[in-house]
Amino acid sequence: MTADSHQDGKESCKYKDALELHLQSSEAAVRQRTVIVLGHIGENAHPSHAAVVAKRFQDPEPTVFAATAVALARMGKPGAVALASGLQGGRSELEQQVICEALGRMADWRSAIEELPSLARCLQDEANTRRAAAEALCRLTFMGPAEALEVCPGLPQQLVLCLRDSEASSSLVGNATNLALVELRRLEGQTKVVQPDPRIDPKVHVTFLEVTKTDGASVTFSPLKFTLRDLIFRTSCMIEGTKTRLASAAAVKGAKAGAVKLGAAEAAASVMDGMVSLASKVADAAESPTAKAILPTATERTIKVDVTVDLIKELNVEEVDVKIKDFHTDVVVAEKVLGVKLVRNFVERAISAKASEVATRMARERTNRFMSRFQCCY
């Protein structure tokens, strides 16, 4: 906390009595506005403010209850503790859903994770509460898998049991599929440059033209990973490099694959490094001004590639694994340019890199989604 924010906290503390007085106003609009003000102070609020705000969970006005949950979700650790405490007692199903979602959307997800046991207990409640708790648990576990498993070692098994519960899981799985697709569609128009080994590999500019899904697309869960099945990526691949460099890359990659198949180890790896070095020198020589005057110098070739894939995200692994199930391109052109297998590999790498970025962003950008659902709270 900066000196300025610390000062803000002190100033906020000075006005605690006045704020508490407003929270007890007979007018619902005054109580609601006071909660909103405290929420906007957020993590800079004095620690005692969370307990003051949490008293509004007893408010008879639903809009004040919603504003209270939003405010506490912005108040860091004290807010997380107050939200978890709010799950105890005889809350209505709707109130429990609101509190579960508030915990799951906290910007300070580390503090929220400390309250996972309270969320896990909600997996025994009514169907809508179970669904809201499961969504919050999934999101927080995604944000900090190691921290979540430390707090709740049995959490993955609990989630799997919940997802087998048809009442609680049907909307959860459907929403997860649609949510993931919406996020992945943001890739449309973006380009990822892939060049695994700059010494020999050409630059392949993979542009995502369209992201869609088959009719059977779905999300499946297990204790350690989730899989998004049957996504379709339509791409345009611009391959940058002279024919000599592309031929060198294809030759070295082919030889390397053969060595791996034969079980080559350190000795073969040394030979491969030598081949890479030689291929790089040959390609560089071919691209010299003198050679370019003699050799064909087309340096850019574009091909369309459509793939159907499964995306697999494992706990504690940032990178998304891509399994290509169906691959469509102009095979003749692909073979002439670089080779179908290499083109496939480049597209796979591009999708993995971008999907990993999306997975990380999904977890972070969803922090404020809860806030927008309650217009009364702003």
Image: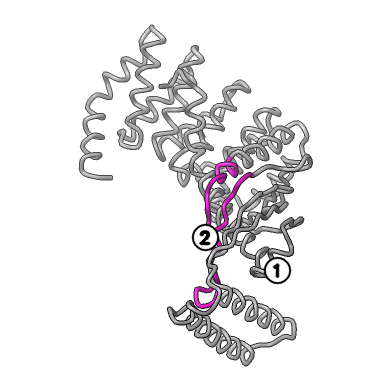
| Residue at horizontal 69 percent and vertical 45 percent from the top | 158
Rate crowding at label 1 as few (under 14), some (14 to 19) or many (20 or more) other CA atoms within 10 Å. some
Left or right position of 145 against 124: left
Q: Pick the residue in front: 174 or 210.
A: 210
Which label lies toward us, 1 or 2?
1
Q: Position of residue 288 (x, y in %)?
A: 45, 80
Where residue 250 sits, quadrant-wise, is: bottom right
Q: Indicate whether residue 90 is drawn in magenta.
A: no
Q: Residue type at mark 1: give it.
A: Glu
Residue appearing at x 49%, y 40% in the figure: 365
Residue shown at 52% from the left, 82% from the top: 280
Neighbourhood count class around disc 2 (C-alpha, 10 Å): few under 14, some 14–19, many 20 upward: some
Which SS class for mark 1?
helix
| Mark 1 vs 2, N-terminal side | 2
Left or right of residue 5, residue 195 in this image? right
Task: Please give the residue where the numbered disc 1 appears in the rendered image.
Answer: 335
Q: Are marks 1 and 2 in contact (CB under 8 Å)?
A: no
Q: Is residue 303 above or below residue 253?
A: above
Residue at which label 2 appears: 193
Question: Where is residue 284 shown, x and y percent of the image?
Answer: 48, 80
Residue type (three-letter) at the residue carrying disc 2? Val
Question: Above or below — where is 4 with respect to 249?
Answer: above
Magenta residues (range): 183-210
